[in-house]
Image (cartoon, coloured by chain):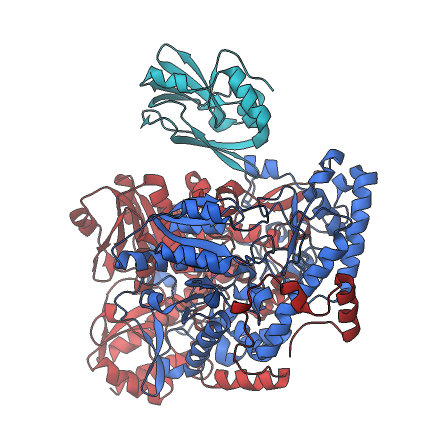
Chain colours: A blue, B red, C cyan
Amino acid sequence: MKNNTSLIFEKSVKGRKAFSLPGPVAKGKKPADYIPAGFLRSSLEFPEISELDIVRHYTNLASKNFSVDGNFYPLGSCTMKYNPKINERICAYEGFKDVHPLFPCKKVQGYMSLLKEMEKLLCMITGMDEFCLHPSAGAHGELLGLMLIRAFHDKQGNRRKKIIVPDSSHGTNPSSAAMAGYRIASIKSDRDGQIDLNELRNALDDEVAALMMTNPNTLGLFEDKILEIAGMVHEKGALLYYDGANLNPLLGLCRPGDMGFDVVHLNLHKTFSTPHGGGGPGSGPVGVKKKLEPFLPVPVIRREGDILTFDFNCPDSIGMIKAFWGNTGVILKAFAYITALGDEGLKKTGETSVLNANYLRKKLEEHYNIPFNKACMHEFVISVKDLASKGVHAIDIAKALIDRGIHPPTVYFPLIVEESIMVEPTETESKSTLDSFIDEMVQIRKEAEQDPGSLKNAPVNMSVKRLDEFKAARFPDVRYKAGKNNI
Amino acid sequence: MDYTPHGREDIRQMFESLKISSVKDLYSNIPEKIRIRSYGIAEGISEPELRGVLEKFAGMNSSVKNLKSYIGGGAYEHFIPAVIDDICSKPEFYTAYTPYQAEASQGILQSIYEYQSMICELTGTDVSNASLYDGATAAAEAVLISIDKYDEGTVAISSAVNPMYRKVIETYLKSSHCNIEIVEHTEGITDVSRIERQISGKLISFISQSPNFFGCVEDVKALSDYVHDKKALSIVIANPLSLGILEAPGRNGADIVVGEGQPLGIPLCFGGPYLGFMGVKKELMRRLPGRIIGRTLDKDGKKGFVMTLQAREQHIRREKATSNICSNQALMALRAAVYMVYMGKEGMKEVGALNICNSHYLAEGVEKTGKAVLKFKKPFFNEFVIEFKKDAEEVFKIFEKENILPGAQVKEAGRNSILCCVTETKNKNDMDEYIEIVRKL
Amino acid sequence: MSIPGDLKYTVSHEWIRVKDNIGTVGITDYAQDKLGDIVFIELPKAGVELEANSDVAVIESVKTAADVYTPLSGKIVKVNSLLDKDPSFINSDPYNKGWIFEIQIKDMSELEKLMDSSVYQNKISED
């Protein structure tokens, strides 16, 4: 029974069931009395399983996952901090969970005022003038941010065609820009891993709509020429976009708005502790300076007499970017987090994330090559290019960590460092956890040098060994079909 | 409060290793000019105080538990089995991230593979992705697939598609070279002859919804046949809960089936987080946006799961990716998967049947009072438009006194009309009470 | 690394074999090696007319994707549909069975801008 890998469909036995439902209101009536036969379904091949067997199936699946609650998870750029339990409880309150989004505004003033309050808090934390809470994720926020930039330039009668992104940027930056109808100009980083001012100067022409930046950048380094950069960008009439993936270390320290950014997106599931959910849901609010406010998506929350209401009547708005008003279930967890931490707690959060990252960096620098080795912010990047001669690559280090119960850091990103391993411990990890991680990394390094073959086999302690990704992509098996041997 | 773990001794030791006396020593390259002292927000509070604050906000909201709601319009009140909350609150699921490391993520990967399989079966399509943000953005992404395939032309949308979805599609298409045409419905149903009359240029996709915004079931086969005649893609937005009883759009010719997965065990939560699902015909597999999970073998020949067909995605293709999406709604997809497994073959059908029978019971009862009529005389699933003889505002007030929200006020439905939704959560007493109020109008 | 002497090469690692006014195009041995095992190719459509250096095809391996560009301007007259079924010919036999498309060359003088094998050899040894 251990490590049972069968699919839920393979556990199905005809005639079994889990569900129970009340009987129909009008006895003797059937769907066929109301719906033409041609519209009714001929068959549905869904599993038939008892309730306990369903629970067992998913409990078994859960046991095959690493998670923040079970494992150290220093996944660079993803800010895998602890997700406070109280916030999960709060989200389950009836007055939050069972509220329909189309209830009349006067019936949902709790939500309306919480959302309005959250907009204000995020403005204060980022130094922006207005916030929109609608985007469902960071990438969704980026798309919105770029649509706003486009609307802004359009309104001025000067469309502009290009977005500049540094070569160290997240892949979503260029792809969001392309989705918003822009061409991409990529600029190289300088020797310190920062934006190269000369490159930027050369790229900045009248066709540039905005420069997208992450600060600290994806190497974990603060872009210390930021004020100069902002000046250059604004002088050309372009806007400055802040990718909030790395906001965590700046909590209580400095704000994108004060650095000159015009548009900011945040990742509530990173900086503000909401769970990542195995890949989502997230939430990616967007903040703007006053001049971009008219273009924000509808509806906008406004006070009308005694109550807060949704205003759909904004002539310059870019429109709607999702049904309803945002991932409110996520937003309220982040709201609870900010409320609990307050000014001091947020500051301590930022500081500790920087302390933890630097502690790891310092302890690992004797054992690993750190290409841009100086005081970092919340994360740093190792390169194991020097192990290539042993046939060992970043992926092998990652898999060896899995065998040791640690979720690997981000590997092969950023693209500008070869064989990169990007480590972000976050502020919620204790020194003891950091020390064990250091020990394991040191041991893995030894193994890589003395017995590289053993690393190539890792992981050996999981439910599966390394998987054949070529086969998966060349002969895609992306759904189960009864009676068909997919593999 | 905060969630940092260090004691004084930890910090002393860490400072010593770093040869610093304060964390500030690590910030030397941050310009003084932009540093702040504080945000000026309130001081932090304890967990018990936090509960108090949030309970107060929650207390200012009505919920479907303390008033009777007949509102649908894109989000639906359904029975959510206890099993779902239990399974989905396992931290191994909700505190993990995107399964970048397959060997340490087999649980979430397998759950998504199973989700994809059930979405394909339910919608009658060949391939499903791992999910998108919500139904509206899924619809917009579906339209982008048609633009990716044909480059330019006309995107036509039925006016019986949820207006919010139409707005989202419009926003997503602002930077494209395609124009959007809205095709007016005829008596609550999309009218093929109007498409023919209205669309002159090259049609690249037609978007319909079934059951549509007014609750009516569309003839997906006739629509898709027409659209295929024009060598365009038929995109159908479907309510997944209806597909336990209504024919799968894919089997009726839809090339892309998308929709809002919220009815499948996801709480209302004031509009999110929800779940956008998308299933497509095999030919469109490589144009799918977002994550896709595939089954493969490990080095010992054992079955396992990985993220696959990644060359479509933003982290590899950057500006040439099929979409910028880099996550999925994994936890919501898990909820939907558990729901579909729990309801199973018979339960999906039965819950669908209950929705049809209950909603028709109410609709017939309301009509019999003579105080209101059904605006559209077409087959419907669990929503229908009621046109009152009285002013709708007044009707709302009367219902409100009884703590009932009789439906959604939607201007698309016309004057004095409301969009009423009945699911398996309403019993005979509830509906008789509703009918009685109408009778007394 | 094989670099046949009778072909012309581009900086983006395509080769072209010219016979009369028809050029056969593929990617070089060096390029296929860099990409790794190829899982899919999106082939161009026959009949399309293109300027030199436009992207015509996409080759996907497990962890990367690369565009293929036309070395010269002209009209695509034939594509190697064998690759639809089995793109691995690009790995195993890049200069023969792994050819991607044939192009009817519009302007033969463009050929002069391409590299011969020795120049290409030098270029990739710099990379």
Q: Which residue extends farthest left?
A: B197
Res A235 seen here: yes
Instruction: Measuring from the top left, give residue A381's x and y in whole percent.
Output: 65, 51
Tell which of C3 and A162 is nearer to you. A162
Q: Which residue extends farthest bottom?
A: B401
Give the answer, above or below, for where B110 lies relative to B241: above
Number of marks in the rendered image: 0
Classify the position of the C terminus of chain A by image quarter. Answer: top right
Instruction: Measuring from the top left, give residue A130's x and y in whole percent.
Output: 40, 71
Instruction: Measuring from the top left, give residue B321's x and y in whole percent.
Output: 45, 44
Give the answer, above or below, for where A454 lies relative to B218: above
Give the answer, above or below, for where A81 lies relative to A236: below
Residue in the image at 72% along x and 43% along y: A396
Q: Which residue extends farthest right?
A: A450
Q: Which picture quadrant has residue A106?
A: bottom left
Res B337 seen here: no
Residue A454 appears left or right of A136: right
Instruction: Measuring from the top left, give residue B428's x and y in whole percent.
Output: 40, 79
Tell which of B280 and B34 is nearer to you. B34
Q: Which picture quadrant has residue A35?
A: bottom left
Residue B359 appears left or right of A21: left
Residue A256 appears left or right of B215: right
Tell which of C100 and B79 is nearer to you. C100
Tell which of B263 and A89 is nearer to you. A89
